[in-house]
Image (cartoon, helix red, strand yellow):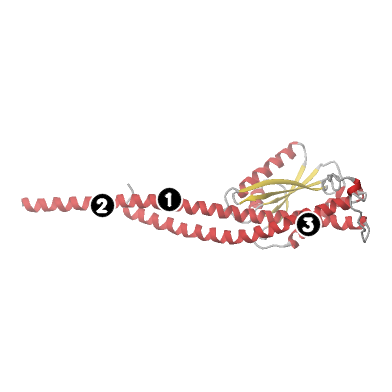
Amino acid sequence: MASLKDIKRKVVGVAKTKQITRAMNMVAASKFKSAQLKMEDFRPYAGKFMDVLNSLALRVDTNTHPLLAVRDPKKIRVICMTSDRGLCGGFNTNLIKATDRFLKDKTAEGKDISLICVGRKGRDFYRKKANVIAQKVDILSKFDMTLSVAIADEVIPSFIKEEYDELYLIYNQFVNVSVQKPTVVRLFPLPSIGQDVDVDADKRLDYSYEPSEEVLLHKLLPMYVHVLVYRALLETSAGENGARMAAMDNATSNCEELISSLTLKMNKARQAAITAELMDIVGGTEALAKG
């Protein structure tokens, strides 16, 4: 059995850890609430944006825009979104596993794959395991639409110049605090704009556009990429803080259980020490009485 002093030291150490995990849980809960509100407010906007884009694409020839060009996908680029910090359960691990499966499948097909890492954890993991051509780290604690615009501005010209043929976005879709679903979305070429809306031609509203439909489509397609990337950033932020909140709550509960177990051991060790001292006193008294 460990000594009483060692057990007391462990109890103090676990109690300090419990204070840290509880504080991190409270901080994550505060950040999660803000991130969740932003994400939930943006989801309807992203959905309506897609509806408008589909409605517009039904009236024009979408084959004229370079972002809709379909080529033989020999070169593939992937944007992998992870968190900048750890201590958030399996949030990053599950996403990296999904990314690994995707990369292995495409590599087995003979595709040339390059990676853009958004988030430190993904960058650190793939730095020596994949062809990382760009990275954005330490940016997820505070960001706005300018970040998604910057990411889109890096990938759009390269696709138009045919430096690669397909672009995929892999991120964790927020379901609830405990569940974040790894999701793979194809960004380029944009999937079936104007072809996945099942609307009777007689029921379509006839809008008047100014400028023309073609000009609007050319303006809105890059903006749609901004919207997709920004939504993924919001989902990643909310999912990270939700996962960290759940992980720190579990860690705090584990600390409490460990403290209870150590306290029981400490009491047993104290009782054993007291019993030993009493036996020494009784033995000494008996020796003096016999002398």
What residue do we see at 87% from left, 51% from top?
Answer: 55
In this rendering, position of residue 19 left or right of residue 161: left
Q: Position of residue 291 (x, y in %)?
A: 5, 52
What residue do we see at 82% from left, 57% from top?
Answer: 223
* Kind of residue at badge 1: Glu
CA gap between label 1 and label 3 equals: 47 Å
Residue 243 visible in this rendered orientation of the protein: yes
Local crowd at mark 3 within 10 Å, few (<14), some, or many (≥20)?
many
Q: Which residue is mark 1?
A: 257
Local crowd at mark 2 within 10 Å, few (<14), some, or many (≥20)?
some
* Kind of residue at badge 2: Ala
* Kind of residue at badge 3: His
Residue 140 visible in this rendered orientation of the protein: no
Q: Position of residue 91 (x, y in %)?
A: 61, 49
- The mark nearer the N terminus, 2 or 3, is 3
Q: Which residue is mark 3?
A: 226
Q: Position of residue 87 (x, y in %)?
A: 56, 53
- The mark nearer the N terminus, 1 or 2, is 1
CA gap between label 1 and label 2 equals: 24 Å
Q: Position of residue 120 (x, y in %)?
A: 65, 55
In this rendering, position of residue 129 left or right of residue 219: left
